[in-house]
Each structure stands twice: as C-alpha cells, then as structure tokens.
Amino acid sequence: MQAAVRRISREGTLSVPRDEITDGGKIMEKKNLDWANLSFGYMTTDYRYVSVYRDGAWDEGCLTTDPNVTMNECAGILHYCQEVFEGLKAYTTEDGHIVTFRPDLNAERMMNSAARLEMPAFPRERFLDAVEQVVKANAAWVPPYGSGATLYVRPYMFATGPVIGVKPSDEYQFRILVTPVGPYFKGGAKPISICVSDFDRAAPHGTGDIKAGLNYAMSLHPYVLAHENGYDENMYLDSATRTYVEETGGANFLFVTKDGEIVIPKSGSILPSITRRSLVYVAEHYLGLKVTQRPVAFAEVGEFAECGLCGTAAVISPVGRVVDHGKEICFASGMDEMGPTIKKLYETLTGIQMGTVEAPEGWIHRIM
Ligand code: PLP
Ligand code: COI
C-alpha cells in the first residue's frame, strides 16, 4: 500500500487522499488475522472517515488514520447524549468482490434518527460515498469469503459543540469506523437462552424506533443482570402494558408457527430492522412463506415452533428458550441447532449477501 499520509484537517488528524488508498486499484494483501475465530469485538483498523458540521454545513470529509476523538468538555454528546449511529457490514463475495448490503436503508434510517434528536442530516449520497471510501481504504481488513467473519461498519454522529442549557448543539461530527467481526453471540448458529426483562427498553412515543446511543445506555444494566443469571439477552415487553413482545437490546424478533408461517412483532417502539425487513421479502418472495406482522402477546410465545433474533450483528440467531421468572418456554427447534425455517431464511439471506444467491435489484452495493 502506497498511502502517502498528509495532514489536512482543522483538527490536525492524519488524512490520506482518496486515490492513494489502493495499490494500483488492486485489493491489497489481507491482514494476518485468525478470521474464523474472530468474536464480535473492536479492533483498530487503518482508516476511519470523519466529517465535521460547523456553521450550518458539513465539511468535505476525509479519511484519517487517527482513531481518537478530541472534543470540548461541554460537548453536547457528553451531557445530553445527542448521538445516533448505524450498523452495516461489508462482505467478500464468492467471486472476490467486496460489497455492502442495502446501505441506502442505513443512510435513510440515520437521517430519521438524527431528525428525532434535532441533529443535522448527513446526506444520503454523502453517507454512501463515505461507506465506500472507508471500506475501500480498509479492504485488507475485510474477512475473506467463507471465513464466517465480516467487516462491521459503524457510522455514527455526535454533538461536539458546547451546550450547558438543555438544547441541541450546533457542531457535530459524522464518523465511520470499521472492524472485522465474527458472530454476535458466542457459538454462532447455536440457539441462545434469553430472559424476560423487568426493565423497559422504550416508551410509546419515545425513541425506541430510532438508533440512538441513549437506547443502549439504559439496556446495559438489564444486559449485565441477564448475563449474571446465565442468559444471552433480554426480551423486552411493551412498557405500556407489559404484555406484548417488543425486541431485544440489539435485534428484532421473528417467530415461526407450527405451520411454517412467519410472525413478526409489530410495534411503534422497536427499531425498524433492515435485516428483518429483508427477511420478510426473502420469506415471501424466495421461500413462498406467509408472513404476518402484528402485535405478538407474550402469552402466545410458547405456541411458536421457532424463534430468532434478526439484525446486522445477529444475522438470525436462533433462540432455544425464553425464561420468564423461572417459567420456561422451550421451542420445538431445541437448544442444539437452528430450526428448519430459520435455517432456510439464514441460508438465503447470507447467500444473497455473499453472492451465491441472486439478490433483488438494488440490495447489493459493490464497492470493489
Ligand atoms: N433492534 C435493535 C435494538 C438494534 O440495535 C438492531 C441493530 O441494528 C436491530 C434491531 C436490527 O437492525 P438491523 O437489521 O437494521 O441491523
Ligand atoms: C447492529 O446489529 O448493527 C447493531 O447495531 C446491534 C448492536 C447491538 C451491535
């Protein structure tokens, strides 16, 4: 890699010009990592993208080698939690390309999240270009096809301008970091155990339907409790009545009936998962399955044959059992492997992402 590094930004970060990030247009040699045994963790990669919003406008943005962020002690993110983020992945396809999956939907969701927290929109085309730049620059970190790992791409935006009274900041940073990851849950495709949380994740008319750090901060205590009690995740119920299934801390639910139909919990306070929306299409158009999206009462969960968690990080992680204060619901699919319908969904979706199954138009964004 010939990346001549130069200093350009106002913050004094190190930046590389865009046309110097690949070696003559070829993908540079992969990093020497144990790809098959990566966990879902952070490691510092070579480049990240940063753009600064100041005086009512985004600057042109650049790649930087500096993984650190410096900001004022009174920055809005530090006091009033003005932050939104996204999560998507870059994949190496069977024929050796690097692609991302429906990044336009991440761009749109991030604009919706930003609007709810009174933050400026990072424009869709800029978002797509930034993802492309940062993935290209870190091509050596994109796990090889067949390794089971992927490059997790984390766009995020936060308030850097000082505020002491409660109000929106007037300066922001949009950044994207990337890190190679393995499965979100230890054991990969092995079914997990979850428990019903005593805490609520989101309120009606609150922020549960946007991707903001504040939704995750409040989930950390229930997350620690769940882990201390031997569970992998929490199932959150609706906070108004505590009778309907909402979602987990980082994924939407998907259920399969005994007749092989798909049921998706519908609620205004869950995140509109891109994976779940894609799975609905895959179920209907690739697998010919009936899909119903409706409120799902916790009382009926035991009637389903299979249960899965869907999200970018989780892909579709099978759930083997749900425990509600000592009362166990065990799905017929068991604790050893994915149930047959979730397996078909998983294989079709990952096949689309890795280029072994033909994708619907516009889903796959080729980067190189
Ligand atoms: N629900 C929550 C709370 C999440 O954090 C995520 C992860 O992004 C999802 C659902 C799944 O969304 P997506 O499929 O867009 O990654
Ligand atoms: C994702 O799936 O991208 C998320 O942001 C979930 C997070 C809990 C890792």
Image (cartoon, rainbow, N blue to C red):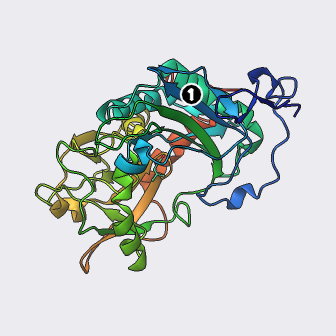
Residue occupying the point 51% across, 62% down = 185
10 Å crowding of disc 1: few (<14), some (14-19), many (20+): some
Q: Position of residue 287 (x, y in %)?
A: 42, 38
Q: Position of residue 64 (x, y in %)?
A: 70, 35
Q: Secondary structure at mark 1?
A: strand
Left or right relative to 175: residue 211: left
Residue occupying the point 48% across, 53% down = 314
Residue occupying the point 41% across, 53% down = 250
Q: Quadrant of residue 279?
A: top left
**Res. 275 visible in picture:** no
Task: Name the foreground residue: 169 vs 127.
Answer: 169
Left or right relative to 291: residue 220: right
Q: Quadrant of residue 292?
A: top left
Left or right relative to 125: residue 143: right
Task: Name the foreground residue: 136 vs 235.
Answer: 136
The amino acid at mark 1 is Ile
Residue occupying the point 53% across, 57% down = 184
Residue holding disc 1? 364
Task: Name the foreground residue: 166 vs 271.
Answer: 166
